[in-house]
Amino acid sequence: MARGKTIVSLIAAYKAVKSGYQVAIMVPTAILAQQHLETFKKFLKQYNIEIELLISSVTKKKKEQILEKLSKGKIDIIIGTHSLLEENVTFKKLGFVVTDEQHRFGVRQRSTIVSKGNNPDVLVMTATPIPRTLALILYGDLDISIIDELPPNRKKIETYAVTKQLEDRVNNFVEKQIKEGRQAYIVCPLVEENDEINAQSVMEMAEKYKNNVFKNYRVEYLHGKMKPKEKEEIMEQFKLGNIQILISTTVIEVGVDVPNATIMVVENAERFGLAQLHQLRGRVGRGEAQSYCILKYQGNSGVIKQRMKVMQDTNDGFIISEKDLELRGSGEFFGTKQHGLPEFKIANLFIDMEMLKEAQALANRIIDKDASLEKGDNLLLKEIVRKKLNGRIEI
């Protein structure tokens, strides 16, 4: 069942197609692209809408056919990963662009897909909660809508933060859920063991669980270094219920929808940001059964305990993201510098938000009166901005 932002994008895409335009939907992973394809086809099959998938695992011959049909306007909706950004991907009449989990794409990547149409409408979507005030700065040029209600019959996910001493109890709880016919995710911060980092790895955990702890159940693993086809096959088997325990890196944090999975165990939870933990927790609780998130952490520092307490106390993504920003700072909150987030020598994005909103309002007034920055003092402002951006954006 499509809910939340997926159904919003589906309805908007339908309207664009019926208005005579093509639609591009760009997502960060092949797994999510495949999932969107299934959802869109399920809902739109009766409306004679042509939908295709463009990801790296598509064969060369199939890709050539898709590109030709797309350029001639014979495909209405194309769903894909970064593959959509390639130069040879052309549209006849692109009118609507969706970027899902937008924080996974850089500013240039988003502008590249938009440039393939003639000023198309754009919808950017994310399940990563961004502090409401910060969203005003990041998306000041967009209309912002927030879905902050759970679908009917969804139960609050019960969250527990535990130390390694309780590992056996956690494993017993996981087994109890599996015996009741449910499935579990185990998330690790590393793919393979690393002598320099004291943290659980997917490969180490998979071996231990397969051969020892959960040897009576089907245990599989998933990580970003695997071939796309391998990942798709494992995910499909998990969705079908043929795999009881899936051990993974954060490759599953985005968009994966398996309603029968009711337990999420995060190893070394102290190594993840709060917003990321909230994303991971969102992989369970997608059906009507009670779901659980168990955060296993190491370390006794006050900050670690404070962060774990935040996750236990609230399921509100906006409260969590505010706390994450407060505890870690904006740079770490978003992970990389590519997101266009401003770096200030003096200002603090969390503390100085009111001043930043005031600066944004002033910037909007300047743009309203002199969008090209050609008048009076604005010429000097234009030169400062040009130097600051160092040719990255034409102004």
Image (cartoon, rainbow, N blue to C red):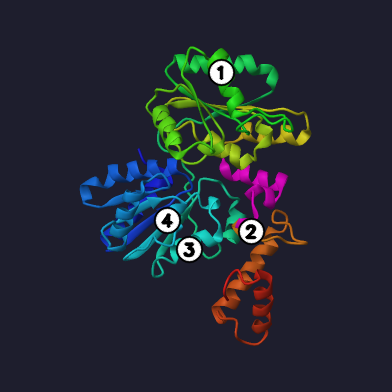
Q: Where is residue 77 in the image (x, y as percent from the top left)?
A: 32, 54
- Quarter assignment of residue 22: bottom left
Q: Judge depth for marks 2 and 1 and give the one in front.
A: 1
The residue nearer to you, when weighing 196 against 243, is: 196
User: Which structural element holds mark 1?
Assistant: helix
Q: Is residue 320 magenta?
A: yes
The residue nearer to you, when weighing 165 against 7, is: 165
Residue with the mark numbered 3: 112
Q: Label 1 is placed on what type of residue?
A: Tyr
Label ID, residue 209: 1
Q: Do the residues labelled 3 and 2 touch (CB within 8 Å)?
A: no
Q: Label 3 is placed on what type of residue?
A: Thr
Local crowd size for mark 1, using a 10 Å CA cut-off: few (<14), some (14–19), many (≥20): many
Q: Judge depth for marks 3 and 2 and give the one in front.
A: 3
Q: Where is residue 160 in the image (x, y as percent from the top left)?
A: 62, 26
Label ID, residue 84: 4
Local crowd size for mark 3, using a 10 Å CA cut-off: few (<14), some (14–19), many (≥20): some
Residue with the mark numbered 2: 341
User: Which structural element holds mark 2?
Assistant: loop
Which label's residue is closer to the chain start, 3 or 2?
Answer: 3
Label ID, residue 168: none
**Residue pushed farthest front?**
61
> In the image, what residue occupies the spot 29% across and 56% down?
76
Q: Label 2 is placed on what type of residue?
A: Leu
Which label's residue is closer to the chain start, 2 or 1?
Answer: 1
> In the image, what residue occupies the spot 35% across and 58% down?
23
- In three-dimensional space, the C-alpha distance between marks 3 and 2, rounded to whole angstroms, equals 19 Å
- In three-dimensional space, the C-alpha distance between marks 3 and 4, rounded to whole angstroms, equals 9 Å
Secondary structure mainly formed by the magenta segment: helix
Quadrant position of the N terminus in the picture:
top left
